[in-house]
Amino acid sequence: MTRRSMLASSALAGSAAALPGLAQAASPAPSTGLHKGSGPDVAWLDPAPPAAHEGQAWGQPWPRGTKYDKSGYHLSGKDGKIPLQTWPLAWWPDGSIKWTGHATAADAALADGFAVKPGAAKGAPSLKLADGSTAITVTNGATVWSIAKSGTNFLRATSADGRTVLEDVHFHATDQDKPGDDGTGPVEAAPKLIRSTGTITGAEIEQTGPIRAVVKLFGKFTGEGGDWMPFSMRLYFHAGSASVRIVHSQIFDGDPAKRFIRGLGLSGHVPMRDELHDRHVRFGGEDGGLWGEAVRPLTGLRRDPGETFRAAQVAGMPTPPLSEMSERVRPNLQFIPAWGDFRLRQPNADGFSIIKRTAPGFGWIDVDTAGRAPGLGYVGGTTGGVAFGMHDFWQRCPTGLDINDAASDKAGFTVWYHAPDAPAMDLRFYHDVMGMEDYVDQNRGLDVTYEDYEPGWGDASGIARTMEFRLWALPATPSRDRLAQMSATMETPARLTANTMRVYEADMFGPWSPPAADGNPLREKIEARLKRELDFYVGQVDQRRWYGFWNYGDVMHSYDNDRHVWRYDIGGFAWDNSELSSDLWLWTSYLRTGRADVFRMAEAMTRHTGEVDVYHTGRFKGLGTRHGVQHWADSSKQPRISNAAYRRFYFYLAADERCGDLMRDLNDSAKALSTVIIERKVNAREGDNRMTGSIGAGNGLPEGQVMMGFGTSWGSLLAAWLTEWERTRSEWAKSMIVNGMKSIAGLKYGWLAGGAPFDLKTGRFLGAGDEISISHLSGVFGVFEITAELLTLLDVPEYEEAWLDYCAVYNLTAEKYTLPGGAPGAAGRGLRQAHSRFTAYAGVMRDDPELKRRAWAEFFGPGDRTDRDQYAEGHRVTGDAVLRPVDEIIEISTNDASQWGLTAIENLTLIGDVLRP
């Protein structure tokens, strides 16, 4: 019996003491065939299959007991057998396969609905990789890529059909020593510009093909300002594709008061062999549109060169021989201006412009404007060229595309992931000390603005950003239709995904289940709110313009009903930074609905919260930053934000190696708690914001020990260790989990102790645990969901007992609250509605009808929206109360939306059978 069937039927009998056998239950017989259940194993994320794609990769879940087929796998669909490249992503404790990664060649599997079957399918993939002393060569049919192992040009040269079409691809940055004149103060000396170039220091081959090859490069930016901004990048090649996908992750490790980033770009060169009138420039436009012109235009002239010439040039085809051109034009071609430089700029999410000029030193000419560019450009001619682009182009504004020297023998192109003519990035903290020199005054500030401020701790140094680019090496200018398809690939990439029902049937990611239609009006009421709030947040991203280089992917924390805006400027109420598991809510919502818009919102959030909200170098490395006006501003640095529980979904569903890196980096992140004392301010509070309990300043522990809260810290690290264990079968990672579990169970009050000294080497909690310290935050950062998984994987009955005790008593009223052994304890904890799922879980695991009934009463009791109907629909605000018409839900907060949404989903899964109108 799987956990899914157990929870759905609430069939488990007996007390917690009888549960250990569940974790040791006999696994299903080894399987080598299809999952059972309705629908395909794999389908396109969007309803309609794409017209074309550049190759696919995804993760496929497997029920416990499934044997991994080392001979390979294939897709079976109505088009026949489609070859796959396969690798293991994770294993069940019994050694059976849990997740596999799969890759297809470009344009394979264009029909919808596929089964994943064991056994390699015959095919003719053409992808080969050769590892040389200084370079790695990838041969993909007629396209050959040369990847440097060192130096600044990581792509040295790329040929198509035997001709070099791409050279000298590199990253570069410009920063300045001051933010620049804003026009309001005295004239100052111009900022000094500092230029640096990405320099490769190492290379690693991760996959060699034959369908997919992956090369990982490491480096740093070097230049007159010294070495800085370390980076890693992966180059992805799929058989049959003329493109390379580049996933580039760089860390800002400069002093925000001294280094203001002005430009960040990816550049390369394109040899130009064709006549000027056979050279073409293209930019992707809105809604499938395309802007396309020639370097020397033959259309619109006073004298007509001939229809065949005009039609060929517009289409990007070779023009007829000049001997066939009209005599009124051919002798005078040199008098038609040749346009060498082209520029597209997307300064904000609402508009882009295109300009061009003949050459440096001459004036720019306005071309056109539109709304949102997909981020694709092309320069080349009838004998070869390059298409280049960036994903999430307008969402990451200010961005740009440049083409220069197109009239020369070698054109250049640049994808600007921060445009150099935009204002320089200013990553300095946003206010002064304001009298908050000591902890007491800092906590007074916390009481009024919800900002946990401390001088010097709102530091941006150490945060990161991942960008995705794609380059096509092409033997000739593609058709306009093909370029429009490439634009669509940049804007909304086609994606194969595992059927979420397969994820459910394989028992992944804690207690969740698909929506059920049983006619129950209470269920329908819950489902209506679940959908309404998902729709609302998806819509708010665009309506509130939550875009920009550092911001895209995050949402705001709380709403200001008076101003009709989110509290973007009020301390801890501004950017959400994963507070109360917004990431977890979106991913769980995607799993149960399969909605493409929710997937992409969760994907953007995963990219953001794992990079921008987490420190990757420096004194806070491995910790994340609490919610605030700037993503890095708050002085509370904790594992609850760097939490691997929020990354696991994307890692497994998308087989995303970058997420794998981020989670692995967290394995030893607890060491940061030796110097970053989370509880340092707790006992310096005045007024009603004082916390109870014994977790004090956390100082005075022996070397190698840190003070560790069970929920927000240890519970967050569990996800990293669990992922490492299932990915690599690491005994160390398993021991860190088990030792923590057993030592918590050995404390007098178990989970109710809230935290204890933690030994970094062994993973054991130390001390007596004889005082109560329960926080409303302990269980709401993924520890509930991760624990639900772990209790099916590990047989630690004493920990299970301690956890279920905590779940059962958290929401008890003061008059009923009694600790194990009869000792009285405090009650009246916050987030009671969110903790109803804890009550429900204990009710199911202990087969206790009273706990199940109590859980629903708690769920339908008071929530965060104290003055309004919790199920009220939103409304539109127009007129002079707002800048532009907006939708709002009174008293909405992401804390409430996330925790209510997770609780609703999990309660419906756990105790939906006892939901009574």
Image: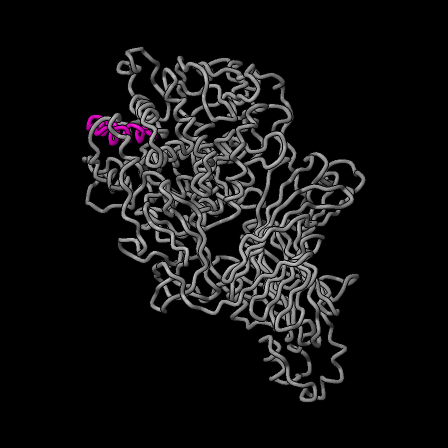
Whether residue 311 is visible: yes
For this view, does 772 lie left or right of residue 523? Answer: right
499 sits to left or right of 459: left
Give the image quarter of residue 710.
top left
Farthest residue toward the top?
823
Prevalent SS, magenta region: helix
Which of the 4 quarters of the picture holds residue 326?
Answer: bottom right
Whether residue 693 appears in magenta in the rendering, the answer is: no
**Looking at the picture, how far across and down is residue 89, in whole percent?**
44, 48
The magenta segment: 833-855
The vertical placement of 336 against 792, above or below, is below
State left or right for residue 72 relative to residue 870: right
Vertical comparison of 716 with 477: above or below:
above
Q: Give the quarter of the figure containing the N terminus.
A: top left
| Viewer-proximal residue among 429 and 661 | 661
Magenta span contains residue 854: yes
Give the image location of residue 488, x and y in percent. Answer: 50, 61
The coloring applied to the image is: one colour
Front one among 642 and 719: 719
